[in-house]
Image: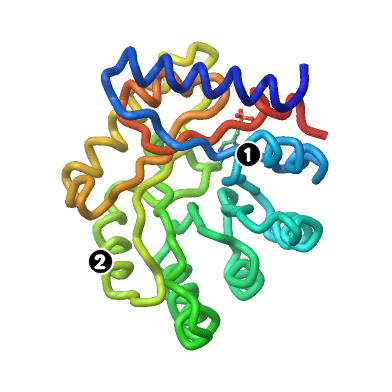
Amino acid sequence: MSVQQRLEQVRARIAAAAAAAGRPAPRLLAVSKRQPVDALREAYAAGQRDFGENYVQELCDKARQLADLPELRLHLIGHLQRNKVKAVLGAASAVHTLDSLRLVEELARRAQVERLEAGRPPLPVLVEVNVGGEAAKSGCTPGELPTLLDALSGARALELRGLMTVPPYTEEPEGARPYFERLAALREALGGAARLPELSMGMSHDLEVAIAAGATLVRVGTAIFGARA
Ligand SMILES: *Cc1c(COP(=O)(O)O)cnc(C)c1O
């Protein structure tokens, strides 16, 4: 099956899940990590504009190789190290993985120079929350979240867009439901959709469950592009 056909299947899954949940359909972030640029071109030709990348270097390389696609937006959805902040500010349309105060402060400081003082708009950002409390995963704890959100509210060069999570993996998609509901509840407790418009949750195998729990953005890789290299 082509990327275009799989993309259409994913769009149909999203539409069906949204209709079943009685919710507006979330936006689709096509996760293109470790996929060749031709696969992104194929998805772009089929109307996809937002892509998720996990590695700063790969995101920057793809931004260069795809500079001829005027509406392409590359979002960083993998962990951001503080020494990569400058590079990401040049190439990414958004960063979805802020998870510490030090990182927020570093990004805010650099974005002031690279974005505001350069006449560019603030950088859209999401805070990643480790709702499953897994030691090996990035993301802040729910307890740290209020402090991070307050820091972001004061950062003029960053535009706070919402919350993101990657739940613990379970064979059954339903296993992710309590984690998605936890993220939705945190958003309600900390200002709701007015302060945090985006809830980024749901991947290839559990996007229906995430949409039922209120996802506004789903991040889908293998169901669109097939297995990764
Ligand atoms: C790889 C990745 C995805 C996509 O996962 P698939 O199972 O391929 O759909 C989504 N979000 C994050 C943060 C990822 O790293």
- List x then y, in percent, for residue 100: 43, 62
Task: Classify mark 1 as within 8 Å of ligand 1 or not, answering yes or no.
Answer: yes
Q: Residue drawn at (72%, 29%), measured in percent from left and top? A: 225
Placement of the N terminus among the 4 image quadrants? top right
* Mark 1 residue element: strand
Q: Residue drawn at (45%, 37%), measured in percent from left and top? A: 27
Q: From the viewer's perspective, is 153 left or right of 188?
A: right
Counting residues from the start of the chain, the first of labels 1 and 2 encountered is 1
Residue under numbered circle 1: 31
Placement of the C terminus among the 4 image quadrants? top right
The nearer-to-camera label among 1 and 2 is 1
Q: Residue drawn at (66%, 27%), measured in percent from left and top? A: 224
Q: From the viewer's perspective, is 13 left or right of 195?
A: right
Amino acid residing under circle 1: Val
Towards the viewer: 95 or 98:
95
Towards the viewer: 82 or 191:
191
Amino acid residing under circle 2: Asp
* Mark 2 residue element: helix
- List x then y, in percent, for residue 103: 47, 68
- For residue 62, which quarter of the picture? bottom right
- Tell me the crowding category of disc 2: few under 14, some 14 to 19, or many 20 or more residues within 10 angstroms, Cα based: few
Vertical side of 61 occupied by 5: above or below: above
Q: Quadrant of ligand 1?
A: top right
- For residue 126, which quarter of the picture? bottom left
- Tell me the crowding category of disc 1: few under 14, some 14 to 19, or many 20 or more residues within 10 angstroms, Cα based: many
- List x then y, in percent, for residue 113: 51, 86
**Label ID, residue 150:** 2
**Label ID, residue 193:** none
- List x then y, in percent, for residue 130: 42, 42
